[in-house]
């Protein structure tokens, strides 16, 4: 069967670090590998690059189109893309999958879409293709939401999350045409590698642990080493929580060294409390890359701030983790979350913390109830109708304690204290000196785009626009229902 897998453009990426992170669609590459193993024709089209969807449909003539939906901010764009596919190819079977689709499929239950995948796509897609080829009902495939004449229904639940090694390594050749466009921070091109999936912790704002019921599945060491070896010189490890299993992590570091796998740059994501417990493990990993960065969910600047999001860690661990990592010559990139209910004192506390511990390489996001979390279920009644693109963690979803104008004045000032502010401590010339001459246009373009995050009027204008449009749409819907 001809299968077309689509990575949509996420839409509104005018705020946040999106311009710095454009990574390959690894989930689609795993699905592609599983389908290729069964003898199917597979194309991955990354619509963040050209050409458009009409061209891909003409080129591939697919029987099935799979669309990834990784984040809540993409819901509206995914539905619109499905509508375009349906108009151009009325007979094609359209399925949507990915993290956001599985965590909260409700916005995707539209007439344009045939099915939503609630489980691991690399396990489920080959079964769905097989059923369609045989003319069998998709209801025979576990883990789906399906459109039917009676409305949306669920196929039987699966028997459990499959082992990650049941599918081959990702079919990276399916995105080779886009490789030079995948980048992270200063590095381009970048490869994405997954060694494990899931997280056992319970941060209130995170949908990962709630989707996977706090489980953490690991790929075999042999598979991970092979994947690292086949990847390029700059690797972003996509694990939700790296170094979670110390014994396995140490064995993996040793296996990579034995294979002679060393990289120019590696980026991993982990927790502060793990670093505090894993100095020996981090020593073992540090030689594997010339530059080795850690992304830390620092989240708050005090114990009370961390307790408010169920971080299950203390501020002392954040401070110790940063110190330990720096002593071992790791680069630290962090993120803090800022609540709608923040006062001016909360902002001052954060600024002081960032300055005191030199955490200017940090990002700042607005605490957002993501669909699929208990936090969202608690707050849903308070969230007015608005575009799903506002769920990018850089928009206010409801009126903040300080008022919209004052909140965004302080939020923009927070970003001005980061290294992204080219009018601050790190000027544009300092960024340019860190990249190869061929990459100067890229870094200049990305930094130019991120400067709007330092301007409160940019946030305020967009807030008024999206909330006004939503209010008008809601009013029209109310009149029509009378």
Image (tube, rainbow, N blue to C red):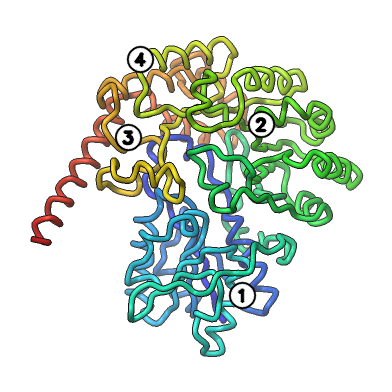
Among numbered discs 3 and 4, the one appearing first in the sequence = 4
Q: Secondary structure at mark 1?
A: helix
Around disc 1, counting alpha carbons within 10 Å, would you say few (fewer than 14), some (14 to 19), or many (20 or more)? Answer: many
Around disc 3, counting alpha carbons within 10 Å, would you say few (fewer than 14), some (14 to 19), or many (20 or more)? Answer: many
- Quadrant, the C terminus: bottom left
Q: Which mark is residue 294?
A: 2
User: For the residues marked 2 and 3, what is the alpha-carbon distance in whole angstroms?
Assistant: 28 Å
Q: Which residue is mark 4?
A: 344
Q: Which mark is residue 126?
A: 1
Say which residue appears at 57% left-offset and 81% top-offset: 1
- Quarter-wise, where is residue 39 in the image? bottom right
Inspect this view and state whether residue 49 appears: no
Closer mark to the observer between disc 4 and disc 1: 4
Q: Secondary structure at mark 4?
A: helix
Q: Are marks 4 and 1 in contact (CB under 8 Å)?
A: no
Among numbered discs 4 and 2, the one appearing first in the sequence = 2
Q: Which residue is mark 3?
A: 396
- Horizontal and vertical percent position of residue 229: 79, 50
Closer mark to the observer between disc 2 and disc 3: 3
User: For the residues marked 1 and 3, what is the alpha-carbon distance in whole angstroms?
Assistant: 40 Å
Q: Residue furthest bottom?
A: 135
Inspect this view and state whether residue 7 appears: yes
Q: Are marks 3 and 4 in contact (CB under 8 Å)?
A: no
Closer mark to the observer between disc 4 and disc 2: 4
Among numbered discs 1 and 3, the one appearing first in the sequence = 1
Among numbered discs 2 and 3, the one appearing first in the sequence = 2
């Amino acid at each position: 069967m001809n299968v077309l897998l689509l990575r949509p453009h996420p839409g509104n990426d005018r705020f946040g670090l999106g311009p710095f992170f454009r990574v390959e669609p690894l989930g689609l590459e795993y699905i592609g590998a599983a389908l290729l193993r069964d003898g199917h024709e597979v194309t991955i089209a990354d619509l963040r690059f050209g050409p458009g969807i009409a061209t891909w449909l003409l080129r591939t003539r697919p029987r099935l189109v799979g669309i990834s939906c990784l984040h809540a901010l993409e819901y509206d764009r995914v539905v619109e893309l499905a509508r375009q596919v349906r108009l151009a190819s009325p007979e094609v079977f359209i399925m949507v999958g990915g993290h956001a689709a599985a965590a909260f499929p409700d916005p995707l239950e539209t007439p344009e879409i045939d099915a939503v995948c609630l489980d691991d796509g690399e396990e489920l897609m080959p079964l769905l293709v097989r059923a369609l080829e045989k003319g069998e009902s998709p209801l025979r495939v576990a883990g789906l939401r399906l459109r039917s004449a009676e409305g949306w229904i669920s196929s039987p639940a699966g028997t459990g999350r499959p082992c990650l090694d049941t599918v081959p390594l990702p079919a990276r050749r399916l995105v080779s045409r886009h490789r030079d466009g995948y980048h992270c921070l200063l590095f381009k091109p970048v490869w994405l590698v997954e060694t494990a999936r899931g997280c056992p912790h319970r941060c209130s704002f995170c949908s990962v642990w709630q989707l996977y019921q706090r489980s953490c599945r690991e790929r075999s060491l042999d598979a991970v080493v092979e994947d690292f070896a086949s990847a390029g010189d700059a690797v972003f490890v996509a694990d939700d929580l790296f170094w979670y299993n110390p014994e396995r992590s140490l064995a993996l570091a040793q296996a990579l060294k034995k294979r002679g796998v060393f990289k120019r740059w590696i980026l991993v994501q982990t927790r502060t409390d793990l670093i505090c417990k894993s100095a020996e493990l981090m020593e073992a990993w540090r030689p594997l890359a010339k530059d080795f960065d850690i992304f830390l969910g620092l989240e708050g600047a005090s114990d009370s701030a961390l307790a408010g999001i169920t971080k299950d860690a203390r501020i002392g661990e954040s401070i110790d983790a940063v110190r330990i990592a720096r002593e071992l010559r790791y680069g630290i990139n962090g993120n803090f979350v800022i609540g709608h209910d923040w006062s001016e004192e909360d902002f001052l506390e954060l600024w002081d913390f960032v300055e005191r511990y030199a955490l200017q390489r940090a990002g700042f996001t607005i605490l957002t109830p993501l669909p699929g979390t208990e936090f969202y279920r608690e707050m849903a009644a308070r969230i007015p109708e608005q575009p799903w693109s506002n769920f990018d963690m850089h928009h206010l979803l409801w009126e903040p304690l300080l008022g919209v104008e004052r909140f965004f004045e302080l939020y923009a000032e927070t970003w001005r204290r980061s290294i992204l502010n080219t009018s601050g401590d790190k000027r544009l010339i300092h960024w340019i000196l860190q990249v190869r001459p061929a990459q100067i246009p890229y870094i200049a373009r990305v930094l130019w785009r991120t400067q709007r995050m330092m301007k409160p009027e940019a946030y305020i204008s967009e807030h008024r626009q999206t909330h006004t449009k939503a209010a008008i749409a809601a009013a029209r819907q109310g009149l029509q229902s009378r």
